[in-house]
Image (tube, helix red, strand yellow):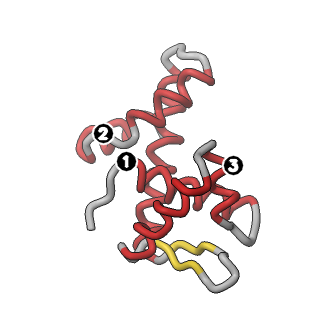
Amino acid sequence: MALQESGEMYLESIYMLSKEKSDVHAVDVSEYLGYTKPSVSRAMGILKNGGYIIVDRDGHIRLTDEGRKVAEAMYERHTLLTKFLISIGVDEETATEDACKIEHVISEKSFEAMKKHIK
């Protein structure tokens, strides 16, 4: 199943939340992203069916290996792109917002080239 931008955003959010707390629930994702609970619930179902997350009977959300792979890639892109934009004079808030948009559309080839010059 190919993920769309929203799926990547959800996985990255679950990843970031799991770094802060041991148990991540749909309500946490909803609050973090500012999305409605029904929207998050629908997305969790899609991600679960796609094999990206596991939701146990208590509602704890865990990333599968594939889900973690996607989430870590998005997180790396977001972090690196934010650093790059700040390094060329963009303020941190704008850099963070723009990196969030760019991380989903930049090609792997361009991203790898940027990585060589930024790290």
The secondary structure type at the circle numbered 1 is helix
Q: Please provide percent x and percent y for residue 36.
A: 60, 49
21 sits to left or right of 53: right
| Residue toward you, 74 or 40 | 40
Q: Say which residue appears at 48% left-offset and 59% top-offset.
A: 71
Q: Residues within 10 Å of mark 1 (few under 14, many from 20)?
A: few
Q: Please provide percent x and percent y for residue 3.
A: 32, 58
- Quick check: 114 above or below 12? above
| Residue toward you, 67 or 86 | 67
Q: CA distance from mark 1 to mark 3?
A: 19 Å
- Name the residue type under label 2: Val
The secondary structure type at the circle numbered 2 is loop
In primary-sequence order, the first of circles 1 and 3 is 1
Which quarter of the rendered picture does the N terminus lie within? bottom left
32 sits to left or right of 47: right
Residue assigned mark 2: 105
Q: Say which residue appears at 48% left-offset and 17% top-offset.
A: 88
- Name the residue type under label 3: Glu
63 sits to left or right of 57: left
Q: CA distance from mark 2 to mark 3?
A: 25 Å
Circles 1 and 2: CB distance less than 8 Å?
A: yes
Residue assigned mark 3: 31
In primary-sequence order, the first of circles 1 and 2 is 1
- Quick check: 99 above or below 104? above
Image quadrant in which you'd find residue 77? top left
Q: Say which residue appears at 37% left-offset and 47% top-offset.
A: 5
Residue assigned mark 1: 5
